[in-house]
Amino acid sequence: MNLSGLFFLVFLTLVLVFFVYQKIRDQKLLKTVTKPNRGTRTERLMVLKLLKSGIPHQTIFHDIYLKKPGGYYCQIDLVIATKVGIIVFEVKKYNGWIFGLANQKYWTQVLAYGNSKFRFYNPILQNRKHIQDLRQQLPQFENIPFYSVIVFFGNCSFRNLDYVPNDTSLIHSSRVTKAVKKILDQNNPVKYRNKREIVNLLSAASLNGEKEEIKIAHINNIRRNFGY
């Protein structure tokens, strides 16, 4: 092997070592909040983005299942409890063009220059309902601000998505850190009556997501509601 070939082999070895080290480090960091098999890959990437931006792991709650009246559950991708209120995330992964209005029940994903179209439930309405369900859990939530953040992963672009509410952020995944920082910087701190009560609620809801019977019941309920 000549000298240039040796240098190339050493370079590839270093790249591989760095990749493995980074993977191990990320998995260790992720485990401070959630398990490596919880939720979707994009949700876990969101958790890592928040952790790497400086959000304390104790304030991040992933893949939570809130129990509602009637024995039903509400699944929420991600919640963080901050000094200015509760930030609720809805995480999506889509490619192509995304069309819709804030008050429309369904949005449309367009692929292949219009040759393929798919409808999906409006994530603004979806996350608004999640916030409503959260507010009903504790009396003190009535006086605490909630912020809705809709995050899209994938190679997608928003087309004609008008009338997004002021309390809602609709962003690509690359802008998550800026969006959270803006919420934290531009809003006043709130006074929580009982922080431990909120942590206990969110922690218990997160533990619900580890119970297979709850997840199955939730999926079946969604199928009944949407007729599939």
Image (cartoon, rainbow, N blue to C red):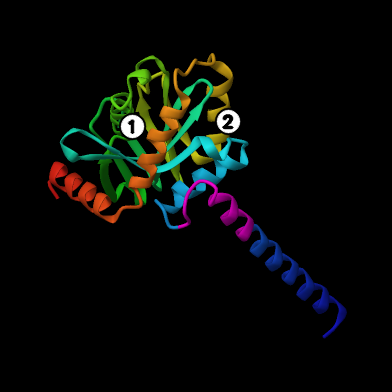
**Horizontal side of residue 25 vs 147, given as left or right:** right
Whole-number angstrom distance, CA of label 1 to CA of label 2: 20 Å
Highlighted range, magenta: 23-36
Question: Percent position (x, y) of residue 40?
Answer: 41, 52
In the foreground, 54 or 209: 209
Relative image position of residue 129 (x, y in whole percent): 28, 29
On the picture, is 90 further left or further right than 18? left
| Disc 1 versus disc 2: nearer the observer | 1
Residue 155 lies in the magenta stretch = no
> In the rendering, at what x and y percent does residue 58 appear?
53, 38
Q: Is residue 174 visible?
A: yes
Res 178 label = 2
Q: Residue at x 25, y 40 (%)?
A: 73
**Quadrant position of residue 87:** top left
In terms of secondary structure, where does tag 1 sit?
Answer: helix
What crowding class fits label 1: few (fewer than 14 Cα within 10 Å), some (14-19), or many (20 or more)?
many
The type of residue carrying mark 2 is: Lys
The N terminus lies in quadrant: bottom right
- Residue type highlighted by circle 1: Asn
Question: Which residue is the site of mark 1?
Answer: 127
Q: Is residue 28 inside the magenta stretch? A: yes
Q: Is residue 189 above or below residue 124?
A: above
Q: Residue at x 48, y 29 (%)?
A: 81
Q: In the image, 39: left or right of 216?
A: right
Front in this rendered view, residue 100 or 227 = 227
